[in-house]
Amino acid sequence: MAGVEAIDKLSLELSRLPGIGKKTAQRLAFHIVGMPEDKVRELAVAIYNGKKNVHFCPVCGNYTDSDVCSVCSDTSRRRDIVCVVRDARDVNALERIREYNGLYHVLGGVISPMDNVGPDDIRIRELLTRLAGGEIKEVVLATNPDVEGEATAAYLSRLIKPMGITVTRIAHGVPVGGELEYTDEITLMRAFKGRREL
Amino acid sequence: MAGVEAIDKLSLELSRLPGIGKKTAQRLAFHIVGMPEDKVRELAVAIYNGKKNVHFCPVCGNYTDSDVCSVCSDTSRRRDIVCVVRDARDVNALERIREYNGLYHVLGGVISPMDNVGPDDIRIRELLTRLAGGEIKEVVLATNPDVEGEATAAYLSRLIKPMGITVTRIAHGVPVGGELEYTDEITLMRAFKGRREL
C-alpha cells in the first residue's frame, strides 16, 4: 500500500488483471501517476472504449466495432469454408498466420460438463443455422487440443457429417521448434499417427 | 493486430506501460473487452483519478491526494530526522519495512551529468530550506547505491555536514538471502568493511 488512496485504488484495480501481481500493479500505478495527464487520459479512454465499442459479430461471434466483423464483411474471403473456434481471441491467433482465407464461427466456449456448460450454452445452434444455408462445404474444427476441445469437436463432427459437409480437425503434432525428447507421449503418438508422405 | 480498431488501440496504449510487451498487451486487451462494463469503468476511472487526484506533497515531494502527505501530516512521527530519497516510490518501499518513523525528502531525481541533471534540477534547495529551520538533527541519505545515487549522496553530505547536522548513509552489503559466492566484489568489499561486532 502506498498510503495514498488514489494510488492504492489504482493498484488494486490493476492487480485484478490476469498476470498482474501485486508488485507489478503497484509499479504500474506509480508509472501511471508519473505519466503526462493527456497520456493517462488516452489510456483510460482506450480501456473504456475498448469495452464500450466492441461487441460480438451477429454472424460469426467474433469481436467487432462495426455492424458485422471484418472477416464476415470481407468479400475477398471464401464463403464455403468455416473454421470453428472457442473464442474470439482464437480468431485473432489464426488470422495472424495469414494462411486461412475462409470464415469463422466462434462458439463462445466449449462443452464442459465439469463447468456445467452444455451444447445449448455455446453457439452451436447458430452454427447449424449457418450450415443449413447450404453454401458451406467444409467445417474446420479448431477448438483447443484439450479434453473439452476434443469432446466439443467430436460432438460437432457427429452433428455436421450427416449434413453432407466435410468436417476436418486441425493437426496435432510436435510444435515447431520443439524437441521430441521433451514432447509428451500423447502428442508424440499423434504426431506419429498423423505422419505424411514427403 | 486484432483487426478491431478499438482493441488494437487499447493494445497499443497498454503496450506503452513498462514491462508490458505486445503479446501481454493484447492478452490484457482481450481480457478487458471480456470484462463486465462496470468493472471496466472502475478500472478506467481508477487510472484517470490516480493521475488527476495525486500530486506532490509541497513539504517533502512525496505523492499525496491531500494537501500535505500522510507522512508529513502524521503527528506521531519524529520531526528531527529526514530520510532523503530519489523518488516517491522509494518512500513507499521504505514505509513497507515499518522500521523508520521520521520524515522524508523526495529529491525527484539524482545528480547525473550524463543525463544533464544538475543540483539545481532536483529538490536540493527545498531540502536546505527545511534543514535551515533547525529542527532536524539527522539526515539519512537513502539514494540508490549506484553511481548517480552515490554522487548525489556525497554532494549532499558536503553541503549538510557544515550545518552541524548528522549525515548518515544507508548500509551497503550482501542482500539477505543472497550468497557470498554470487555477490559482486564491490558489494562484498562494502559488506566486509561495514562489518559490525556481534
Image (spheres, coloured by chain):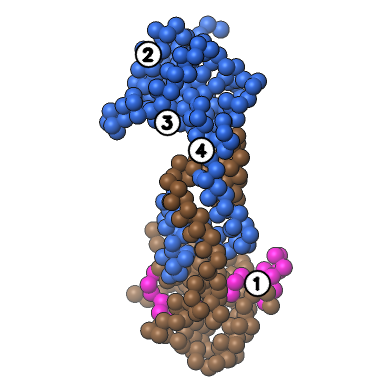
Chain colours: A brown, B blue
Measured Cα–Cα span from mark 3 to mark 1: 55 Å
Say how many tags the image has: 4
Q: Nearer the viewer, mark 3 or mark 1?
A: 3
| Marks 4 and 2 on same chain | yes
Q: Which residue is mark 4?
A: B55
Query: Please, what secondary structure does the residue beneath circle 3 have?
Result: loop
Q: Position of residue B131 (x, y in %)?
A: 47, 15
Query: Please, what secondary structure does the residue beneath circle 2 have?
Result: helix
Q: Tell me the amino acid under the disc marked 2.
A: Leu
Q: Is residue A92 above or below residue B165?
A: below
Pick whichever of labels 3 and 2 is earlier in the sequence: 3
Measured Cα–Cα span from mark 3 to mark 2: 18 Å
| Left or right, residue A112 beside residue B81 | right
Read off the chain for label 4. B
Q: Tell me the amino acid under the disc marked 3.
A: Gly
The label on residue A25 is: none
Measured Cα–Cα span from mark 4 to mark 2: 28 Å
Instruction: From the image, give the main secondary structure of the stretch colored magenta.
Output: loop
Q: Position of residue B78 (x, y in %)?
A: 60, 17
Frontmost residue, A85 versus B121: B121
Q: Is residue A104 above or below residue B107?
A: below
Q: Which residue is mark 3?
A: B108
Q: Which residue is mark 1?
A: A111
Q: Tags 4 and 3 in contact by the CB under 8 Å rule? A: no
| Marks 3 and 2 on same chain | yes
Frontmost residue, A84 versus B112: B112
Please report the residue visible at 54 percent of the width from the left and 60 percent of the height from the top: A48
Q: Which residue is mark 2?
A: B159
Start and end of the magenta stretch? A97-119
Q: Tell me the amino acid under the disc marked 4.
A: His
